[in-house]
Image: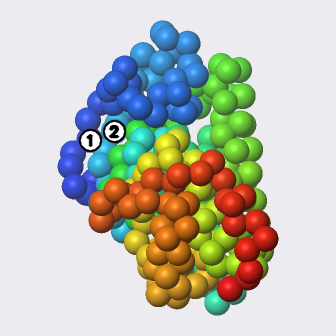
Amino acid sequence: MNNSLQLTTEQSRKPRCDHCSTQSRCLFATLPQATHEQLWLQARERTVAVGERLETQGAHAQTLGVIKVGLLNGLRRGPGGEDKPIVLLGKGRLVGFATPFGQPSMLSLVTITPTRVCEVDVQAIREIAMHHPPFQQALYKSITDFMGCMGDWSHLLRQESYLTKVCVALHLIAAEEGNQSFRIPSHTELANVLGARRETIARHIALLIETGLFRKIDRWHGILTTPDCSPLSGRAVE
């Protein structure tokens, strides 16, 4: 099954690596300059519409991509063939990381905010990049970090308090963005990944604002005011 990204809101263009805010997290940036320039000739940067599926569980992708901007829902298919969101992924995460190893995708990925992705055909990855040990090590680290991220989302679901769940979720999103200030996913998207109702998410975000742990910048953006959720320690479980 061909699972390469489809053109949506704009045509492909060459990445502008020198001006990229994701450069420090970019897998492709680990290559020696000459090899990076060779791979750059094969790379495409595209803007992807909200709600687009970039990867499908069980399919063999045709590209390896790096999320440049945006937040994606990671869905896992369970009994009955129903996809359930289990993790949110952002800047620097890979799309199709199983591709270079000839393995099918373990999750489906769907955009929930405006997204830009840099991608390279898997054949070019195998022929140009995989021969370089620094690239291989960076790829393994990206996969390990991804597994850690999955563990963090799994752990937060074991919290008894929804206030703590929402607080930790916002901190994990900030970590994906690399900034305490970030675009807030819709209450519905947060509710889906946390197994809650939309009204529950809205109420507990309001509580975080009331307690001074979170501040709205505008309708779509907010900023965390503490480095973690420790101020909630000992608070009564709702």
Q: Residues within 10 Å of mark 2 (few under 14, many from 20)?
A: many
Tell whether label 2 touches label 1 (CB within 8 Å): yes
Q: Residue 16, relative to residue 213: is it above or below?
A: above
Q: Residues within 10 Å of mark 1 (few under 14, many from 20)?
A: some
Quadrant position of the C terminus in the picture: bottom right
Q: Inspect this view and state whether residue 190 appears.
A: no
Image quadrant assignment for residue 71: bottom left
Residue depicted at 71% across the width and 20% down the height: 133
Q: Residue 234, relative to residue 226: is it above or below?
A: below
Residue depicted at 46% across the width and 34% down the height: 22
Residue 87 placement (x, y as % from top left): 61, 64
Residue 31 placement (x, y as % from top left): 56, 19
Circle nearer the N terminus (1, 2)? 1
For disc 1, the marked residue is: 12
Q: Nearer the viewer, residue 167 or 69?
A: 167
Tell me the SS state at disc 1: loop
The Cα–Cα distance between marks 1 and 2, rounded to whole angstroms, is: 6 Å
Q: What's under tag 2, amino acid-wise? A: Glu
Q: Nearer the viewer, residue 79 or 128?
A: 79
Q: Nearer the viewer, residue 98 or 202?
A: 202
Residue depicted at 49% across the width and 43% down the height: 179
Residue at the farthest front position: 211
Tell me the SS state at disc 2: strand
Viewed as shown, does residue 154 lie left or right of 16? Answer: right
Q: What's under tag 1, amino acid-wise? A: Ser
Q: Residue 17, relative to residue 162: is it above or below?
A: above
Q: How is the image coloured?
A: rainbow
Residue 171 placement (x, y as % from top left): 59, 56
For disc 2, the marked residue is: 45
Residue depicted at 71% across the width and 36% down the height: 141
Viewed as shown, does residue 170 lie left or right of 198? Answer: right
Viewed as shown, does residue 48 lie left or right of 175? Answer: left
